[in-house]
Amino acid sequence: MVGKKTSQMILLVLMVLGLPVLGLVLSGKPLSPYFRFPPATMFVHRAPFSWWAFAVYTLFIAVCITPFILQGVRKPGVWTPSIGRLRIFPWWGGLGAIMGLCAWILAWSRFPWFQAFQAHTFTPLWLAYILFVNALTFSRTGRCLMLDQPGRFALLFPASAAFWWFFEYLNRFVQNWQYAGVGFGPLEYFLYATLSFSTVLPAVMSTREWLLTFPRMRTNFAAFFPIPLPYPKFWAACLLCAAAAGLAGLPIRPDHLYALVWVSPLIILVSFQALMGEPTIFSPLVGGNWIGILSGALAALICGFFWEMWNYWSLARWTYAIPLVQRFHVFEMPILGYAGYLPFGVSCCVVSEMVLGEMKSARADFI
């Protein structure tokens, strides 16, 4: 099993790194602007806002999410928690809340005595968030990812840094976001960015486990609607080819294919698993079990809200330039851009479980 996972990761890395470059070569575009470091995001033309595109994207998103909203607001079924009664909120969760509040104040203020550290508030904010949300889970179940398997949980941090660098790489070819308020050289940029990126997977996975403590998540989506998929290897091969073509097309048609930044790596990885006869995160859908996918997607959306909110008035921050739908912002993000967090959350789950294996957490008994 370890050998299979290693080979899947190697193939994914090779495809993610190589296919966009292949697209550049085929299109005859110069390579050098795409590989400047720290990155420069000023040379890809972006299509202006389009009401037609906005309407089509909005309708598509609404059709996809409305059934889940309606199912989610239904009265939850009977669910007996597997772990005792609610516990007192742990002291270390309170410490996380205080740390988070202090980091939030420092991130949005401009105290002269803090000037040297003003660009480095992202990581403390998210370490505090991770501590706090694990405490929320512990207070409801007596267990949490951080305490159940601390060694494996710690591995999420370096895995997260590598994971997000791949999205930074793909963004070079569509240039949907860029960073402002920092003037780091290449080494500083790499070190500080890696430190910030390391908090992504721990935050999403900890939030996911907290969501799984709620009865509506456990009962309303355990037998929602099944999606039978005959000939899984055939469809996996088709999707793999489509995702590969999409990655190669990113630098050729960035205005139309930019959403594949969030979808293609997930499709490639899950397709490899299916072709090798392994269960995937989508396997439970055959029986109508949407808990795993939905909890991951919602966890990333919740984290996404806090990412965008805390980013808004921070000194070191990011801004967006998304083709066709660059309007109606919630913080810096155009409102339709939040839909990208949903497949991103599923990708976080897939990568985390490849790194950690089946964790003995509150989620393991139900997914």
Image (cartoon, grey):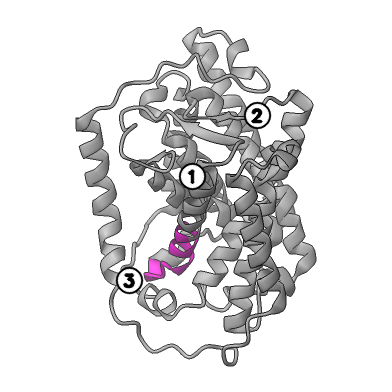
Q: Residue at x 60, y 64 (%)?
A: 206
Q: Earlier in the sequence, mark 1 or mark 3?
A: 3
Residue 288 counted in the magenta span: yes
| Mark 1 touches mark 3? (CB < 8 Å) | no
- Disc 1 versus disc 2: distance between alpha carbons? 34 Å
User: Viewer-nearest of labels 1 and 3?
Assistant: 3
Report which residue position mark 2 lands on.
182
Residue bounds of the magenta highlight = 286-298
Q: In the rendering, at what x and y percent does residue 178 appear?
A: 54, 28
| Residue 21 shown left or right of residue 305 in the figure | right
Q: Residue at x 74, y 48 (%)?
A: 158
Q: Is residue 353 visible?
A: no
Report which residue position mark 3 lands on.
72
- Disc 1 versus disc 3: distance between alpha carbons? 26 Å
Q: Secondary structure at mark 3?
A: helix
Q: In the rendering, at what x and y percent does residue 134 appear?
A: 64, 70
Q: Observer-nearest residue: 138 or 270?
A: 138
Q: Residue at x 74, y 24 (%)?
A: 186
Q: Is residue 78 visible?
A: yes
Q: Residue flagged by tag 2: what amino acid is it? A: Val
| Magenta part, dominant SS | helix
Q: Observer-nearest residue: 24 or 329?
A: 329
Report which residue position mark 1 lands on.
267
Dot 3, crowdedness within 10 Å: few (<14), some or many (≥20)? some
